[in-house]
Image (cartoon, rainbow, N blue to C red):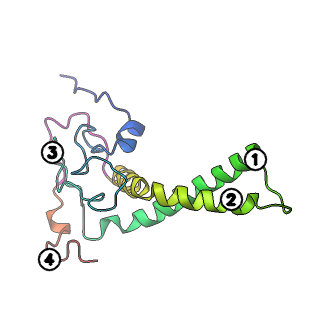
């Protein structure tokens, strides 16, 4: 019997913050909102396939680098678009306006960047399993220490 394929592709599952193993369950407890409180509260396990969302203690430390890299790319894109549409000049304050615009945009995008970088990071370490309904997720209990969880 051929396993059922998810109707979500890799990019859609990462952008939508779905479990990378089954591409069905949501990674985060709350829906996305532009508020900081509770924005990173993740389900301990995928509600659909049971995949642990924290594979080991300190697993998400690397997401800071991912988020930074994405912010640099967004800054470069906004600079190019600003230059093409408005332009930069040393004779007026267009560069300062771009700095303000870019800073405000990055601050407003921060909750989304944090969630997206976690989803992307997890997808690099947990492969998609088209037969997830019939197989169990990898046991990661030996890499977890409940006393050290969220100790940062």
Q: Which mark is residue 97?
A: 2
Residue 97 % position (x, y): 68, 59
Q: Which residue is mark 4?
A: 147
Q: Secondary structure at mark 2?
A: helix
Residue at x 51% of width, y 63% of height: 68
Per the model, the C-alpha gap separating discs 2 and 4 is 47 Å
Which sits earlier in the primary sequence, circle 2 or circle 3?
A: 3
Tell me the magenta residue range.
126-138
Which sits earlier in the primary sequence, circle 1 or circle 2?
A: 1
Residue 59 % position (x, y): 31, 65
Q: Which mark is residue 135?
A: none
Residues at discs 1 and 2 in contact (Cβ within 8 Å): yes
Determine which quarter of the picture holds residue 143.
bottom left
Q: Is 46 in front, or is 74? A: 74
Drawn side of residue 27 relative to residue 89, left or right: left
Residue at x 22% of width, y 27% of height: 3
Which sits earlier in the primary sequence, circle 1 or circle 3?
A: 3
Of all residues, the one furthest to the top in this rendering is 1
Q: Which residue is mark 1?
A: 86
Per the model, the C-alpha gap separating discs 3 and 4 is 23 Å
Q: Secondary structure at mark 1?
A: loop
Per the model, the C-alpha gap separating discs 1 and 2 is 10 Å
Per the model, the C-alpha gap separating discs 2 and 3 is 45 Å
Quarter of the image with the N terminus is top left
Residues at discs 2 and 4 in contact (Cβ within 8 Å): no
Drawn side of residue 10 relative to residue 21, left or right: right
Which sits earlier in the primary sequence, circle 4 or circle 1?
A: 1
Q: Is 151 in front, or is 140? A: 151
Look at the magenta stretch and give its main secondary structure. loop
Residue 110 % position (x, y): 44, 59
């Amino acid at each position: 019997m051929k396993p059922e394929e998810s109707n979500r592709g890799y990019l859609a599952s990462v952008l939508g913050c779905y479990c990378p193993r089954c591409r069905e369950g949501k990674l985060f407890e709350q829906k996305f909102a532009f508020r900081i409180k509770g924005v990173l509260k993740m389900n301990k396990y995928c509600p659909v396939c049971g995949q642990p969302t924290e594979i080991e203690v300190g697993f998400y430390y690397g997401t800071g680098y991912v988020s930074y890299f994405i912010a640099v790319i967004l800054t470069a894109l906004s600079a190019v678009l600003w230059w093409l549409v408005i332009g930069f000049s040393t004779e007026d304050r267009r560069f300062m306006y771009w700095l303000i615009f870019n800073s405000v945009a990055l601050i407003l995008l921060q909750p989304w960047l944090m969630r997206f970088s976690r989803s992307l990071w997890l997808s690099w370490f947990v492969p998609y399993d088209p037969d997830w309904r019939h197989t169990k997720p990898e046991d990661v209990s030996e890499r977890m220490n409940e006393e050290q969880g969220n100790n940062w």
